[in-house]
Amino acid sequence: MSILVVGSVAFDSIKTPFGVADDVLGGSACYFSTSASFFTDVNLVAVIGDDFPQEHVDFLRSRNINLDGLQKSSGETFRWKGRYDYDLNEAHTLETHLNVFESFKPELPENYRDAEYVFLANIDPELQLEVLQQVKNPKLVACDTMNFWIEGKKEELIKTLAKVDILVINDAEVRQLADEPNIIKAAEIVRGFGPRILVVKRGEYGVLMFGEGSIFSAPAYPLEEVFDPTGAGDTFAGGFVGYLAATRNLDEHNLRKATVFGTVMASFTVEKFSLDRLREIEFSEISDRYKKIKLLTEFADID
Amino acid sequence: MSILVVGSVAFDSIKTPFGVADDVLGGSACYFSTSASFFTDVNLVAVIGDDFPQEHVDFLRSRNINLDGLQKSSGETFRWKGRYDYDLNEAHTLETHLNVFESFKPELPENYRDAEYVFLANIDPELQLEVLQQVKNPKLVACDTMNFWIEGKKEELIKTLAKVDILVINDAEVRQLADEPNIIKAAEIVRGFGPRILVVKRGEYGVLMFGEGSIFSAPAYPLEEVFDPTGAGDTFAGGFVGYLAATRNLDEHNLRKATVFGTVMASFTVEKFSLDRLREIEFSEISDRYKKIKLLTEFADID
C-alpha cells in the first residue's frame, strides 16, 4: 500500500565537527520518501523552485517515488543552513529561507486522494489539516511537528492532532507540548489530544513508543561515526510508516517491528551528509542492522 | 557469596521540585549495600562520626549488612547538600562537608580480606587502590568514579582501573575520561584502561553495557514520579554486583540479567527520599519490575 507524504524539499547547508556540505538535497519529504521507498511506493506532495536540478528529480523517481504532487514554482527552493557541535543531538539553525515554500498550498492530485497511509511531515499545522481534508478515507494518519509550531500555533496544532493516529515527535517537544517534564505523564497528555500512538524520538538514546497501556523502548543503533544527524527523524518516520504501509498491520507487535525498522533507517542517514548513505544501501543491510538491534536488547526471563 | 563494599555513609540534604529532605541517610556505601542486600550478604567499609544515630546502624544490620568495617571517628559524619531542578538527570551540589571522611583510611577487618566480590564506590582512586591491596584474591572487582577524580586524579584513577574488572560510570564521565564524544569509541578507550566490562549509566535513558565485542542496551524502568534521583547510581551498582555475587556467574547472559536487576533497584530508590523506598519493598516487587522491563523491550525477529 502506497503512502502519501507532504513536507519540504530543500537545499541544506550543514557544518558538523566532521565536515561541511553546501546546498545538498534535504527536506523532510525527501528523507521520508527515500526511507519509505525501501518498503513501499510513495506519493510525494511538496514544492520546489526553478533552481531545482533534474538529477534530484531523477533520483527520487529512481526510488519509485511518485512526483505528480511535486509543484514547481518560480523562485528559489527552500534553503536551510545549520550547524552541529559535538553534542550532535542539537541542531543550531543559522539561516532559514522559505523561498517558494512561503506560499506553498498543498494541492493533492486526484490520484493521491484515495491514500490510505498518510504522513504529514513537519510543516504548518494548518497546512497539515488542509492536506488531510483532501484525503477521502485515510486508514492511518501519522504526523510530525516541532517547537516552532508548538510555540506559535499550538491551537491549530491541537486541532490537527485530533485527526492524527500517530504522532512522531522529539523528546523535548513532547514535554513542551504537554507542559510536563515527566515523559510518561507528558505522553499521556499528548495522547489525550488525539493520537492513539505517540512515538518519541530521543536521538542517540533511541525511541519510546506509547500506546494504549503499553510502552515500547528501542535503543538507537550504536554507531562509531555519527557524521550528520540532519534528516534522522524524517528517515525514522519513513521506515516506520513505510513498514506499516507495506505490511498493512497496525497491531502492537507490528508497530514495534516498524519502530525498529525506523531506527535502522535513521542509523544509515546519519552516517553521511544528505541522502548519500541511503543512496547506497541494499535491503540486506537493513535486515542486518535489525538483527543487531535484536541482539543488543535481548536478555533472559526470570522465573 | 558476600560482597565487600567501600564507600561513604552520609547525611544528605536535598531539594527537588517535589520536596525537601534534611540530614537523611545517604552515601554511596549505604545505597549500594541496601540494594545488594536483596541478593546477598554485604561487608561494609566506611566511616561515620559520633553523631551517627543507632537507628541507622540498626537498619543496616537488619538488612544483613556486616558492619565490622564501619569505623567510628570523633567528629561529624560526611554531609552532602544538593538540589535538582526539573532536569532530574543533573545534581547541583550546594555544599560538601567531608568531616570524618577527610581522614578516612579504609582498614579491612581480617574477616573481609578473603572477599571474592568487591565494589569500590566513588571515593579517591588512591583509597580504592589501598582497599584492593588488602584483598587477597578477588574474583571480581567493580568500581565507580566521578568527574572530580577524572579532573583531579586521572593518573591515579587509571592506575586503579588497571586492577578493575567492571567500571560503572555515568555517560558524561565516560566521554570525559576517554576525551572522546562518541560513546562507542569512548567505551573502547576506557576498556583499554583495564576494565573488561564497562557499564554506562544514562539516567532516565537507561544503561549501556560494553563487553568484549558486545553491547547490551537496557532502558530505565518508566516511572511517572521520579521524586529524588540521589543514590540511583549506587543502587544500580548494588543490584548489579549483588546479583552477580549471588549467582556466581559472570557470563554475558548473566551480566545482562544483572544489568536489568540493577535498573530495577534504581527505579525504587528514585521514588522517595533517601533509602525510604528500599526499606519497603519485597523481592516480588523486584521480579515484577524485571518482567515489565522485559515486556518493554520485546519485539519480534525478522526472517
Image (tube, coloured by chain):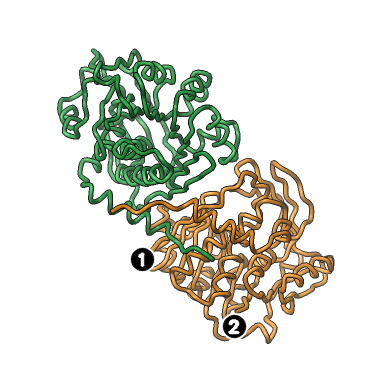
Chain colours: A green, B orange
Q: Which residue is mark 1?
A: B213
Across and down, in percent, residue B241 comes to 57, 69
Residue A240 to residue B248: above or below: above
> A88 and B199: which one is in front?
B199
Residue at the (70%, 45%) spot, across then down? B16
Q: Earlier in the sequence, mark 2 or mark 1?
A: 2
- Whether residue B98 is visible, yes or no, is yes
> A62 and A162: which one is in front?
A162
Measure how far apart labels 2 and 1 are at the Cα level. 30 Å
Q: Amino acid at mark 1?
A: Gly
Describe the element under mark 2 as helix, strand or loop.
Answer: loop
Q: Is residue A248 left or right of residue A167?
A: left
- Look at the image and tell me in which quarter the C terminus of chain A lies: bottom right
Residue A267 to residue A140: above or below: below
Q: Is residue A282 left or right of residue A162?
A: left
Residue at the (69%, 80%) spot, across then down? B107
Image quadrant assignment for residue A24: top left
Residue B53 to residue A134: above or below: below
Q: Which mark is nearer the camera, 2 or 1?
A: 1
Describe the element under mark 1 as helix, strand or loop.
Answer: loop
Which chain's residue wears label 2? Answer: B
Number of on-image labels: 2
Across and down, in percent, residue A279 comes to 21, 40
Across and down, in percent, residue B177 comes to 48, 60
Disc 1 crowd rating (10 Å Cα; few below 14, some 14-19, many 20+) is few
Could you confirm whether marks 2 and 1 are on the same chain? yes
Which chain's residue wears label 1? Answer: B
Q: Is residue B103 left or right of residue B285?
A: right
> B176 and B54: which one is in front?
B54
Residue at the (71%, 56%) spot, across then down? B277
Q: Amino acid at mark 2?
A: Val
In the picture, the disc for residue B135 is 2
